[in-house]
Amino acid sequence: MRPRPAPAAGVPGAGRASGGADVAGAACWGLRAGPPRPGAAAEKSPARRPHRLVARPYVLKDVMSKHSADRSQSATNSTLRHGWWRDAVIYQIYPRSFADSNADGMGDLEGIRARLGYLRDLGVDAVWLSPFYASPQADAGYDVADYRTVDPMFGSLRDADALVRRSHELGLRVIVDLVPNHSSDKHDWFRRALEEGPGSPMRERYWFRDGRGRDGELPPNDWESVFGGSAWSRVPDGQWYLHLFAAEQPDFNWEHPAVADEFRTVLRFWLDIGVDGFRVDVAHGLVKAHGLPDVGSKDQVSMLGNKPMPFFDQEGVHEIYRGWRRILEEYSGDRVLVAEAWTPSVERTALYVRPDEMHQAFNFQYLTTYWDAAELREIIDLSLGSMRPVGATTTWVLSNHDVTRHSTRYANPPGLGVQLRTAGDVELGFRRARAASLLMLALPGSAYVYQGEELGLPDVVDLPDEARQDPSFFRADGQEGFRDGCRVPLPWTVDGPSYGFGAGAGWLPQPSDWGKFSVQAQNGVPGSTLELYRTALRLRKEHPALGAGDSVQWLESPAGVLIFRRLAGPREAFVCTANTTGAPVRVPAEGEVLLTSDGSEIAVADGLAEIPADVTVWWTQR
């Protein structure tokens, strides 16, 4: 057996060696260099992989019929249950960075299927897959060229079916990303729109408009792209088209009936294959205000603004999701819709999960709240109070593929946003992240875990600029768009060309110390972050008070500390204590200690327990 390095990075106190942010070159910087992007030094935007469209099978009768036959039996043999999402722990997989089965540097569906046992043993209830559809990859798959084909980079439709079936055999649900706000500029509709010219029916499926100014040389309005710059691009015939994100991602016109028809077909296609639900990308953006009015302000680029925008959160989106909900209810097996809706408030988010619309919506207000007891209590109360009237459960999330990992965010001072390029106090961030994770998993509702957070991964903040591929980084001249740091391929082993991610280098370079965070380094190691997550998820299943319900009972606590009780019938209660301060605090001992985020023993004297700085404790009362 290969000896593990000591101590493992996932164990408190191990820390991570900081990279030299000012040192040029991957070799000096200490990275395992991935495949270089062609022409990276001269480009203003990342290289785009040549688009490869493959013919779709006419039907998938053999695949779908087999899945339908297996579906009821797999549900019977698994832990699948009615209303499963209400207290589920859902694991987000970013496919290109999870596991590479064919040594091409990109993760793929077969790599995921081969690692499903790891996720079952971790204790999650479902997986959510970021896009794997046919795409030129201008925005890592969120620019879809064909919604009913798997990109050859990730595999095939048969691979997708095999992944879904194996997941169900292991008792795991499968949620897939759906991107309905925009397509790729290589989508057949958009290509035809360019070919057919102004006034053509195909152009009406997108937002083509004449420009302003004497010769139409100015954009139709003042809208800005989330990725920076104007939200409009001009085509050779003089018209402009709308893209709230990259120019390669033209927005659909959801006022056109063909768009709605297409996505109803797409939903049924994947439901027939057997997926358990959809995470709807930019769910708040599909409908634009009538007439596409100017914003009249330069402060409009943020996805999570505090004021209404004519391109986000319009009332018309809700009728779309009511129709989608009716489609899902045609299918057995408790299928779900999850909204990625960056709204100005939790109250606005609650509108997306009314009984006839979606089942869940991401709680981005919680994600953006800093590690501070008063702020956390406020957003917890607001979240629970907003979802309760509509009968929905709250979701809790700390990290995802679009934000700096919470280990690194908490290592930095508050107020810096959710995309950072500074490592901060690495050990402090690591400690706070473990505590924040236990707090999140103690709250009622559903929790989302982003791949690698169970390993304590920090963000790779010092990626060389020439290795970056986030289009927003290039549109903002390197001043914004640092999402690549949370997308670096996972480490599975302590060494190897890509630390077990694949047989060769990955698509993004990995730090030279990545192996100490690996699954191999932490597996079975008491106190490691991996074992902390495994224990927490096991306890969450064993104790009914964890996850279920829609409320918490706050107990008296000193400043900087959260203490709440969750009831599990007349004979058992669960208590969570979270110290968000930088010093130990003495609080009432709340029963028998179940788990501590730092693995420490809690000293109790005269009925008082000393809780270390930045530590969360779970207690049980009988």
Image (cartoon, rainbow, N blue to C red):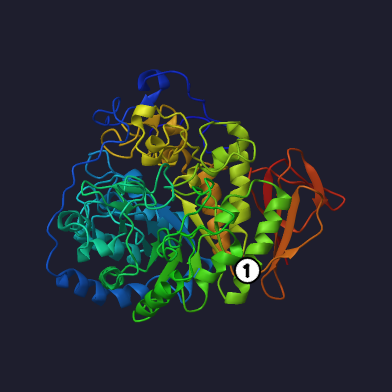
Name the residue nearer the viewer: 618 or 97.
97
Q: Quadrant of residue 509?
A: top left
Q: Amino acid at mark 1?
A: Ser
Q: Is residue 159 left or right of residue 371?
A: left
Q: Quadrant of the C terminus?
A: bottom right
- At mark 1, the secondary structure is helix
Q: Is residue 131 above or below residue 471?
A: below
Q: Quadrant of the N terminus?
A: top left
Q: Is residue 114 left or right of residue 359?
A: left
Residue at 55% x, 72% y: name it: 392
Q: Is residue 340 left or right of residue 526?
A: left
Q: Which residue is mark 1?
A: 386
Image coordinates of residue 365 in percent, x first then y, are 59, 55
Name the residue nearer the viewer: 236 or 462.
236
Q: Is residue 302 above or below residue 344?
A: above
The residue at the far front in this view is 214
Whether residue 56 is visible to the viewer of this picture, yes or no, is yes
